[in-house]
Amino acid sequence: MRHQQDRHKRGTFLLFALAVVLLVTGCTSDFNALNSVTDRGDKIAWLTNLSFILSFIVMGMVFVLLIFALIRFRSGAPSTREGNTRLEIIWTALPALLLIVLFVFTVRTVINTSDNHAEGADVLHVTITGKQWWWNVEYPDLGITTANVLHLPVDRPVAITLKSTDVIHSLWIPEIGWKLDNIPGKTNTLNFTLHQTGEFDGACAEFCGVQHAWMRIKLYAQPGDAFSSWANAAAGNAIPPDSQILQNGKSVFLTQSCASCHTIKGVSEVTNVGPDLTHFASREFIGGGVVENNDANLEAWLRDPSAIKPGVLMPGFNNLPDEEIKALLAYLRSLK
Ligand code: CUA
């Protein structure tokens, strides 16, 4: 009997420990929609926090009453009584009042965040096109095209036009506080102003095929001057090769099929098939975030991208002689 009780206690403890571990694991995520860094996101986070606080108050009251009832009536059930008008009015009116408060604040938040018209000379325009499985990021007024990274200045209104050339994707960077779909044949606009610098991870939030999970984007929220210097560098042509191996790499890029899908500004024609590689070496990740951008990963990627990201459109170049792969690798890694 004693043993059974011990086992029961141990089982309960293990379950409790497991629940704690699972909860804590959930907390380590880099994605945090309540840690808003935009004006619009703040309003939504405020409403969410209000709902949480009210819910916790209600939960606290229920627990207190429950514990009170358990202690007060531990020796047996109380004798049944026929109704209590005053209590019934209270427990109907209080929840109704709570719902009215939440309704009013919800409608207010919807109105305050529904302004979707970013106009004026100061607005920074960006077009983000979802593709299977990466993001094409363009700054039409600045002449910049890049992929899977979103550099934005703080304290300046931003208007992001969302498009798709294949299936439905959804741009979700939780700290922006707003998620919007990229829909083929339709454009959506996402307007906000960042008020905090930092680096924030984003992902596609609409199932779009086998590599949906590896369609990541990184937001760099920068001070105005840091953004300007990034933009100046990003708008320029690719750095010309300054050694024989880099020159060879550039030739491999042009003579193999690379240039029919990828643009290197100043080197090859503009195409819209694969990610722009003009400043490829300045990006932290390759393959839509699937691996870090370093020599070993890039070589593996060039030889057989499907082994790293099954389903990817890019063919492998394992048939190239080793020295050509090495030259191409060195050239791409030089494109800061
Ligand atoms: Cu794109 Cu999921």
Image (tube, rainbow, N blue to C red):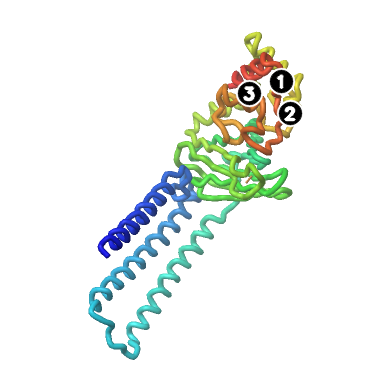
Q: Which mark is residue 253?
A: 1
Label 1: element kind: helix
Callout 1, which amino acid? Phe
Using the rendered view, name the quadrant where residue 257 is placed. top right
Q: Nearer the viewer, mark 3 or mark 2?
A: 2
Q: Quadrant of ligand 1?
A: top right
- Residue tagged by mark 3? 236
Mark 3 or mark 1: name the one nearer the start of the chain.
Answer: 3
Q: Which mark is residue 240?
A: none
In the image, what residue occupies the spot 65% across and 13% down? 246
In the image, what residue occupies the spot 52% across and 31% down? 227
Q: Is mark 1 within 8 Å of ligand 1?
A: no
* Gap in angstroms between the C-alphas marked 3 and 2: 14 Å
Label 2: element kind: loop
- Residue tagged by mark 2? 270
Residue 93, given in percent of the width and then of the height, sits at 39, 78
Mark 3 or mark 2: name the one nearer the start of the chain.
Answer: 3
Please tell me how crowded label 1 is: few (under 14), some (14-19), or many (20+) other residues with Cα within 10 Å: many
Callout 3, which amino acid? Gly
Please name whichever residue, 96 or 65, is drawn nearer the observer in this view of the structure.
65
Check the image and report above or below for 44 versus 255. Answer: below
